[in-house]
Image (cartoon, rainbow, N blue to C red):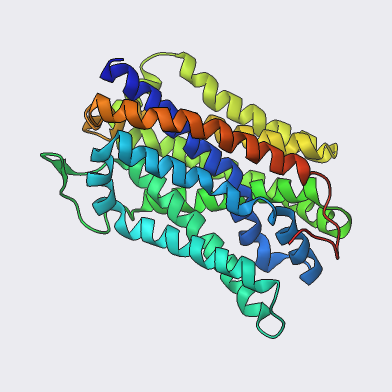
Amino acid sequence: MEMYDLSLIWAIIIAFGVIMYVLMDGFDLGLGILFPFAPDEDARDVMMNSVAPVWDGNETWLVLGGAGLIAAFPLVYTILLPALYLGVFLMLAGLIFRGVAFEFRFKSKRTRGWWNAAFAGGSFVAAFAQGCVVGAYIQGFETADRVYTGGAFDWLTPFSILTGFGLVVGYTLLGATWLVLKSEGHVREWARGLIPKLLIGVLAVFLVVSLWTPWIDPGVFDRWFDHIQVIWLLPFAALLCAVGIYVATRRRREGLAFLLTLGLFIFTYLGLLVSRWPYVIPPDYTLWDAASAPESQFFILIGVLFVVPIVLTYTAWSYWVFRGKVRVGEGYH
């Protein structure tokens, strides 16, 4: 198999792993961001219990995507890690704080408030850092001779800060629709009341980013505005999902609202990929420029094609086993 074909396969696998992480860990982070605003401690217990059986397994996709990236496209690590050290460190620190707080909160009495704060703070920092990294990727990186030549804070700009807060709001919307699906009573009604407000926030950021992005890079502008193309179906589908979320929430179609929120993320993510395709390190290096040797790609691919179906199977089984509502006073932890 030629390098061109292997690199395409790897690009699809890594893109799939990233979107699976965003979708499956996004509502978990969203619940953490909502934590300080919960109506009472019972609501916080329900929020944690709703993700207790699956939250740690969701992060498998982050590990899979990261490992696949360094195996298939090592140049990405060579350039992006120096460019994004601080952003990636903040994301990992947030995930660590959140994970520790998740485990200790259930056992604590006197210090539960501190663990609540750690869970909420870690979730917010991780989500915000992820959004900033996405914004930095859209902006592109200064490189020369396959080396990053920019500064340590080049990733932190007004645009990346906007995408950081945008992802925070998006994850919070995902968390609210998940909570409506998994809870009942006053917890469900509280979460349902948040959805229209969060949806407006997501659409506002979506609009500003969509208008701002083409002016960052003339290539992105040309791709979207030279002439009408099929890729315009992606933002159109995202807007349809947003309308569907509002209608489903009004009609109390809990599962549909959650699925449409996932769809909103998927179409937005695909729009980002289309905007930058085929550059993995914009604006200079394509995925073929960054690829490892075909022999290395093929060797690792065999293992990945064996592992991914197993991960998908146990993930689907976990969600099936722990389906249904989580009630106050009950849980799996």
Q: Is residue 185 above or below residue 251?
A: below
| Residue 167 shows in the view | yes
* Residue extending farthest bottom: 110
Q: Residue at x 33, y 25 (%)?
A: 298
Q: Residue furthest right?
A: 185
Q: Position of residue 314 (x, y in %)?
A: 64, 39
Query: In what quadrant of the picture does the C terminus appear?
Result: bottom right
- Decide if residue 170 is in sight here: no
149 relative position to 189: left or right:
left
Residue 141 picture location, percent across and down = 24, 43
The N terminus lies in which quarter of the figure?
Answer: top left
Q: Quadrant of residue 72?
A: top left
Residue at 52 percent of width and 37 percent of height:
19
Q: Quadrant of residue 300?
A: top left
Residue 163, image x, y percentages = 45, 48
Image coordinates for residue 245, horizontal then vertical, percent? 72, 36
